[in-house]
Amino acid sequence: NIVLLANRARTMNGANTDTSRQAVSMRRSGSTAAWDLIGLTQGSYEVYVTFAVGLPEIDPTGNKTPATGCGGVISFAEETRLATQQAPPLERRLHTTGAWDNFAREKLGTIEFRGSSATVKLTTTAAEPGGCAVVRQIELVRASQPASAPPTTATAPGSLAEVRAQHR
């Protein structure tokens, strides 16, 4: 497994490291955290995100204050220079986990790496006014490889009649 920790991320566009929670704060749309991966084994990886989203504030009448809703949409993708090789990003809507320090782990999907190095980015594509999420880590778990078929030792049959007889 490959674990991408918050304190190792390059943060951009309003994302910042929240040292008290050991997480990256993704407060607004466009907030981005990036990691460089070197020495990858090519193939498919399941992607999991560990995150927290706080509760919206409640006004004195018991209603959620619309200006402080929390949550949003994140996307995770490999950055590539060639648009033709760009796979669609993995996207997920994040909802409250009950508190900004109550972390949950959810699967984003599966990503395919074709090279031995990559840059991956986690970006907030939509954020509620109260902030999207704090992300503690991204985990890449090598997807299980399909079982290989047992080896076959085929020999050419002597005649068409012999083939038909074998398949009756």
Image (spheres, grey):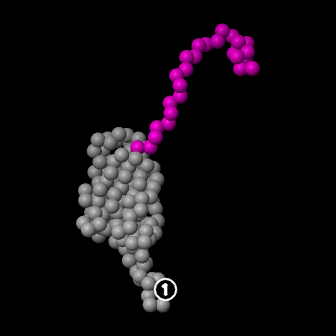
**Residue occupying image coordinates x 44% and y 66%:** 94
Residue ranking furthest to the bottom = 61
Q: Is residue 33 above or below residue 119?
A: below
Q: Nearer the viewer, residue 163 or 55?
A: 55
Residue located beneath label 1 in the image:
63
**Residue occupying image coordinates x 36% and y 46%:** 1
Q: Secondary structure at mark 1?
A: loop
Query: At which x and y percent is residue 75?
Result: 41, 60
Q: Nearer the viewer, residue 53 or 32?
A: 53
Query: At which x and y percent is residue 109?
Result: 46, 53
Say whether residue 27 is left or right of residue 167.
left
> Residue 60, located in which quarter of the rendered image?
bottom left
Q: Is residue 30 above or below residue 87?
A: below
Q: Nearer the viewer, residue 22 or 82?
A: 22
Does residue 71 show up?
A: no
Mark 1 neighbour density, 10 Å: few (under 14) some (14–19) many (20 or more): few
Query: At which x and y percent is residue 19?
Result: 24, 66
Residue ranking furthest to the top = 158
Task: Give the prevailing secondary structure in the magenta stretch.
Answer: loop
**Residue occupying image coordinates x 59% and y 13%:** 155
Residue 160 within the segment the image draws in magenta = yes
User: Disc 1 residue type?
Assistant: Asn
Does residue 114 show up?
A: yes
**Residue occupying image coordinates x 36% and y 59%:** 122
Q: Which residues are magenta?
A: 142-168
Q: Nearer the viewer, residue 38 or 71?
A: 71
Q: Is residue 31 above or below residue 153?
A: below
How many marks on residues? 1
Residue 92 within the segment the image draws in magenta = no
**The C terminus: image quadrant:** top right
